[in-house]
Image: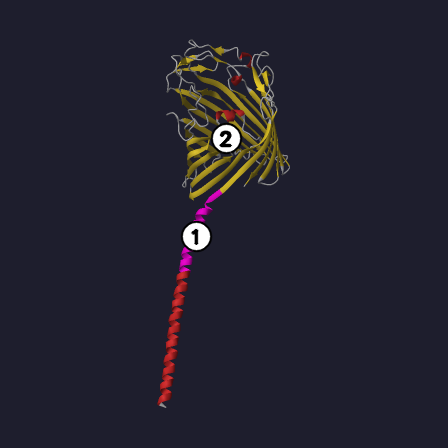
Amino acid sequence: MKRLSLIALMLISAFTFKAKAQEATVKEQVTEVNEKVNGLIERLATDEADLQKLAKIKVSGYMQAQWQYFENPGVQPNNFVSLRRARLKFTYEAADGVKFLLQPDFLPGAVSLREAYVVLNDRWTKSFSLWAGKFNRPNYEVEYSSSQLENLERSLVIRTLYPGEYALGAKLEYKPSMIPIHIQLALLNGNDGLTINNSAGVNLNSNENKDIDNYKDIMVRATYNLKLGSFGGLDFGAHGYFGSLKSNALNTLSSDYTTLKSVNIGDAVKRNWVGGEFQLFADVLGGMSLKGEYIAGKNASIGYAPVAAVGTTAAVPGVANFQNNFAGYYLYFIKNLGKKNQFSFRYDYYDPNTDISGKDVTITKFTAPDATTLKNKASGKSDLATSTFGFALHHYFDDNLRISLDYDIVQNEKVSAAGLLTEDYTKADGTKVPAGLDYSKVVNNNVLTLRIQAKF
């Protein structure tokens, strides 16, 4: 009996020990699982935070491939395929009211930075925003995206005044929610995209990230929107540009080629103009719009002072700064043709020198008082006005794919007599044609463009 009791006690002890051992093992396993779960939760929290950051980044872009045919015999090759634009845009919403934007352009052999700026939005009245970096200059056709242009390139007056469209500086915008007004005030370096050569022909303005003088330019633009009931809407406004470039010459010549003013190196050479604009949108016959802008004022180019020629005692004559009065405008008519097609017509006019007409070209010129220190300057091709009749037809396969056919009829202002202003040109076979282009007639500069655009 005692033996049975001992055996029973041993069995009970064994089972109890085994149960406790199993309980300890289970606790260890539970603890291990909890640690793994907690580690997974921590990793998921980290991944979620990273995903939230990534969700603040928006990527968009577009590519434009085109074939062009040039009717001017002096353009060789007269037809080719090219990439017009290949851009990516990265936008990052860092915080409520704070946005960063970066837009490079990936053309073959010419990668460049198009835009890079930060925007700080007013979180209280939600009416003001402050921009800093490289951004579009405040102008309607400049700010209108290249992927949405109804005619494939901007008008000549805009391309001349605002080369490259973008500028380095700071901008303050006011756009209240209760009033349909938009006011922009920008402080810019002002030299963006300009070529300023020295006596050796070297561009002094090749560094896009640095100003070349102490002068800053001011741009202001204000627009107002009127709703026209069920008919559509009308936007109208004005903008002004008030700037200066540093003189590298000792003289400034006026655009009538008669007035020569003495200046010092470092003096301000003024570039000022104003413009008015409108955009009429009508919800009739499937949708149509009229848009236009007129700009006039004074532009300038910078010369250089006389310098000593290398290896001689003679001097290389200087070139005077040149201030030219100009005027230009464009007018669009745009008509939707169903849901997939659109037609656009634009008349574009630019006169780079309103003080000189075609009959005055090469007749009116400046004769330097001392040709050893200052070069003569004659009126010429750069003073002629240009008119462009642009026709474009677009087909939209969907929101992301557009194919466009564009034909520009380009007409120059004519000089007064045959042979007065001519240009040589070279044919495709290398044969030179002397005086082949005569500006007493309309020189054929028409261009046909077939473009396909893909965006996302």
**Magenta: main secondary structure:** helix
Residue positioned 58% across, 12% down in the render:
419
Q: Label 2: state its secondary structure.
A: helix
Q: Which mark is residue 47?
A: 1
Q: Where is mark 2, residue-wise? A: 142
| Mark whose residue sits in front, 1 or 2 | 1
Residue positioned 56% across, 21% down in the render:
386
Highlighted range, magenta: 37-58
Q: Which mark is residue 432?
A: none
Name the amino acid type tagged 1.
Asp
Q: Is residue 448 magenta?
A: no
Residue 412 visible to an observer of this rendering: no
Taking depth in this image into account, of 241 and 56 the one nearest to the observer is 56
Q: Quadrant of residue 307?
A: top left
Residue 52: percent from left, percent from top: 44, 49
Taking depth in this image into account, of 24 and 153 the one nearest to the observer is 24
Residue positioned 42% across, 61% down in the render:
37
Which label's residue is closer to the chain start, 1 or 2? 1
Residue 130: percent from left, percent from top: 41, 36
User: Between marks 1 and 2, how big is the CA–CA gap?
Assistant: 41 Å
Image vertical order of residue 178 relative to residue 271, above or below: below
Circle 1 packing at 10 Å, graded few (<14), some (14-19), many (20+), is few
Taking depth in this image into account, of 278 and 307 the one nearest to the observer is 307
